[in-house]
Image: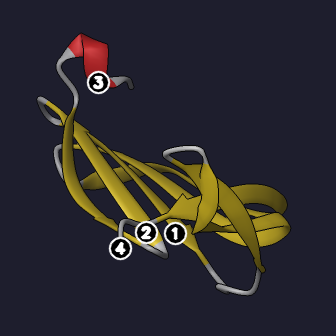
Amino acid sequence: MCTWNNVKIKQIDKSSLVLKKGKYQLKLSLLDDEGHLLAAPKKGAMTRYIKENIVVKSKYEFSYKNEIILSVEDEFSSSEWMWND
């Protein structure tokens, strides 16, 4: 599932993401939001921040017509989250 293939982002926040294409849906949930704040560049200065976690528990659910056909929990996912000021 990718945006260049007409996938729609239905929900996005700091701990979950839901993508949908036709009757298919993929939901990713981070099961804890621990992480580290890292400075990141903004117009040449390190004034923006991202949150990064290289080992985080997560859950993936892939469904078709609202029926879950795959559900997986992973203890070794990585995440990076950024926001605008």
Can residue 72 be seen at all in this image of the molecule? no
Sequence order check: which comes first, mark 4 or mark 3? 3
- Name the residue: 35% across, 73% down: 85
Q: Position of residue 51 (x, y in %)?
A: 66, 71
Q: Classify mark 4: residues with Cα within 10 Å, few (<14), some (14-19) or many (20+).
A: few
**Pointer 2 residue:** 16
Q: Classify mark 1: residues with Cα within 10 Å, few (<14), some (14-19) or many (20+).
A: some
Q: Label 4 vs label 3: CA separation?
A: 25 Å
Question: Does residue 31 appear to the left or right of 2 in the view shown?
Answer: right
The part of the image, by quadrant, that contains residue 71 is bottom right
Sequence order check: which comes first, mark 4 or mark 1? 1
Q: In the structure shown, which secondary structural element does the residue marked by tag 1 occupy?
A: strand
Task: Tell me whether the residue at label 2 lies in contact with that at label 1, contact meaning CB atoms closer than 8 angstroms.
Answer: yes
Q: Label 2 vs label 4: CA separation?
A: 20 Å
Q: Label 3 vs label 2: CA separation?
A: 17 Å
- Farthest left residue in view: 22
Q: Classify mark 2: residues with Cα within 10 Å, few (<14), some (14-19) or many (20+).
A: some
Name the disc covering residue 85, or none: 4
Sequence order check: which comes first, mark 2 or mark 1? 2
- Name the residue: 31% across, 55% down: 18
**Pointer 1 residue:** 29
Task: Tell me whether the residue at label 4 lies in contact with that at label 3, contact meaning CB atoms closer than 8 angstroms.
Answer: no
Name the disc covering residue 3, or none: 3
